[in-house]
Image (spheres, rainbow, N blue to C red):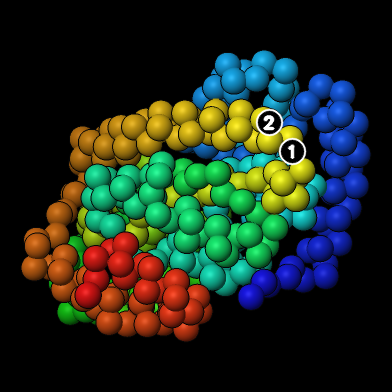
Amino acid sequence: MTIKPKLSALFKSCTLAAAVSLPLASTAQADDSFILAQAMNTDHIFHATSEQFITELDAQNPDYDVEYHPGGDLGDWTSLFEQTMQGAIPMTITYGASEFDPRLDLTWLGYVVDSWEKAREVYGPGGPMVDVYNQILEENDLVSLGIIPAGFGSITIRKGVGKVPTNFPEDAKGIKMRVVPTPLAVERFNNLGFSAVPMPFSELYTALQLGTVDGRAFGPAVEIWQMRDVLESYVLTRDYFEHAFWLVNKDWWDDLPEQERKDIRAAADATLNVVWDKARSIDEDYLAKVREHGIDVVELTPTQLQKAKDSLYANEWPYMEDVVGTDIMDMMRKIAAIN
């Protein structure tokens, strides 16, 4: 199953393709240059990944000239996903845009892993999830070179609410929880007992300030730190592992000479090993900063954690199976060691 973009989105993408791919085609023939774009600022792990890759590729093949575009100057993360899918941009680091294929909501699936050690085993270099995702991505003319980690997402409560939910669904009743605007996110937090409020990230800080929502879900430590002045508690549910894709357009990738693919692959693999170490360190550093700032950081007890897991496995995982199919979910159960 391949979900095609709406006509208006396709038109915009094709227009940008005309603007980007023409100079790209001429320079690629002349000096083996190609575009790498990502939408985050220079403090983000995406930027560190990109810079490391450029260094590694220069060591593998100094004839390459990577035209690097950070900070979203070629579009936001959803636009970059689409442009790479359409071939306007050959390479990007971005999140899975499920508006083009709902199966990509698999990236939000709860409790696949709950520790950095397990996350690296499953999502890291040589882990099984790249192959799982590529079954979906290749139908959208994309190939993932690897998975970029961002850290575990948990829930946080704004100042003034005075509640610290740790037992689900009992403690969650009446709490308006912002979730990412996907059906899977609404399904999860309604099942955990919250009133799920889907909301774009751009509106979240103001909503916390004004009390439109009582808290937010899907929050890795770096984002809790960024919003620290409006938050009072951070409950480490670790209900999902936030990660992104390192994507190339499949047609572009397949058309490269074999040695050039090997050079890029070798540079990407070397980069991924560095990035996974760096990402864990960044995540742990920001969690320490959140604690030092005075936000109440709460660990679930083993019993509370298992209760939350059981809820997701019983409700969310069958829901996701209807989206991605039995074969993929059987692979996910094996990966997560769920009987």
CA–CA distance in space, label 2 to label 1: 6 Å
State the residue in front, 262 or 7: 262
Relative to 100, does residue 235 appear above or below in the rendering? above
Residue type marked 1: Leu
Q: Position of residue 316 (x, y in %)?
A: 36, 78
Horizontal arrangement in the rendering, residue 101 relative to residue 131 (left or right): right
Q: Residue at x 57, y 49 (%)?
A: 144
Q: Residues within 10 Å of mark 2 (few under 14, many from 20)?
A: some
Visible residue check, residue 225 = no
Q: Residue at x 65, y 45 (%)?
A: 248
Q: Position of residue 91 (x, y in %)?
A: 67, 41
Q: Residue at x 47, y 83 (%)?
A: 322
Relative to 308, does residue 144 appear above or below in the rendering? above
Which residue extends farthest front?
258
Tag 2 residue: 260
How many marks can you see?
2
> Quick one: SS at disc 1?
loop
Query: In the image, which disc is placed on residue 136?
Result: none
Residue type marked 2: Glu
Relative to 308, does residue 250 appear above or below in the rendering? above
> Quick one: SS at disc 2?
helix
